[in-house]
Amino acid sequence: MKKIITISRAFGSGGHTIGREVAKRLNIPCYDKELVDKVAEESGFHADFIEEAGEYAPVTNSFLFNIAVSPNPMAMMNTMSMADQLFVCQTNVIRRLADEGPCVIIGRCADYILKDREDCLHVFIHADMAHRAERIVRLYGETRQSPEKRLTDKDNKRRVYYKHYTNRNWGEAQNYHVCLNSGLVGVEKCADIIVDIAKMYE
Amino acid sequence: MKKIITISRAFGSGGHTIGREVAKRLNIPCYDKELVDKVAEESGFHADFIEEAGEYAPVTNSFLFNIAVSPNPMAMMNTMSMADQLFVCQTNVIRRLADEGPCVIIGRCADYILKDREDCLHVFIHADMAHRAERIVRLYGETRQSPEKRLTDKDNKRRVYYKHYTNRNWGEAQNYHVCLNSGLVGVEKCADIIVDIAKMYE
């Protein structure tokens, strides 16, 4: 079985719901907010900061460039931005969770962090703007911003965050094994497909 | 049922094979080389030229810009490059085939050309470099270029062609309903998934 399933997703497309459903059907843990909490414990950062900073990439030199050129990566930690330090903590937590056993991991560039493992299934969930706008208003309520603006802002932040930490393009099909438009395919069918593929390897 | 299935694909990832299998299972026509032949008949271009030019975007101003600003698009045809004229022919053929009834259409920016139809399922097939390299040598034999170089060149040409005619990024998940890594998922399972989703709408 593909033991580790990473779910990357556009805000409002149901990635979290799909991830939870997949985890339930495979009887494995699903790490989302739980991941945040674990990182909080490990790093001493407050959970709310992690939730927030987990979406913003620092406006600094490339994270990967800094790591690559540093003669002493451990000493680098002292000069990294807090957001970058947080990312290093998240990376360690994600790797450890993957080593512990089968699980679903939502977001956090987990597809990139675990890219060299053979036992992962990397999934990207998205949907068109109208579907996502209806969904976020229904689930999270109205805000001063229009839902379309909220979605565009969130997408841009995730794109920048992903690029900063992975040097890859968020949402590019070749980064994932399966990409699904949940508006067309539906949350249940997305979970069916993911579970089906994961189990192919039993 | 989603009547029209467009298959966009990275060279060597089995998009053609998957498209044919899907068409067989749904008992509908599959247009690939047949599409080329239809375009040849319509346009007076020789089939070999179409096969070749179908991959190269002209090094000219944006096709879409030219169409958009022309006061007389029909007159524009006389000043377009041959490749652009060919694209207009292909567009007309693809639209007509979609109007005629359920079918699978492989390549040719069909996902973009038919983007405003509600009855389409747009699929993108890809696989990692090693899988595709092995496959193209097995299916098409060795050439002077390394398989990796052939694949990279083909990918780049398709990327440029797609960008030129659609102003979208080839392989970006949000352009398609389903993207599948055929190396991991397998050709049979890819066909299963596509047929399954297409039939959801019966």
Image: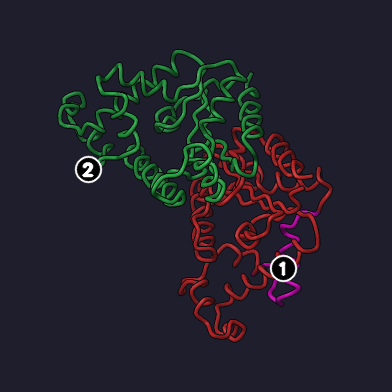
Chain colours: A red, B green
Tell me the SS state at disc 1: helix
x and y percentages locating residue B51 in the rendered image: 34, 30
* Residue at horizontal 36 percent and vertical 18 percent from the top: B38
Q: Any magenta on residue B45?
A: no
For the record, the magenta segment spans: A29-49
* Image: B169 above or below A90: above
- Residue occupied by mark 1: A93
- Closer to the camera in the image, A36 or B28: B28
Residue lying at 52% horizontally and 76% vertically, measured from the top left? A68
Query: Chain letter of disc 1?
Result: A
- Judged from the image, the secondary structure of the residue bearing numbered disc 2 is loop
Type of the residue with mark 1: Val
Q: Which residue is mark 2?
A: B61
In the image, is residue B188 above or below residue A57?
A: above
Query: Picture coordinates of residue B76 (x, y %)?
Result: 18, 29
Is the residue marked by circle 1 packed among few (<14), some (14-19), or many (20+) residues within 10 Å? some
Q: Does residue B3 sit above or below B134 in this rendering?
A: above
Residue A89 locus on image (x, y percent): 67, 72
Magenta residues, dominant SS class: helix
Q: Is there CB contact under 8 Å for labels 2 and 1? A: no
| The disc label shown at residue A101, or none | none
Q: Amino acid type of disc 2?
A: Asn
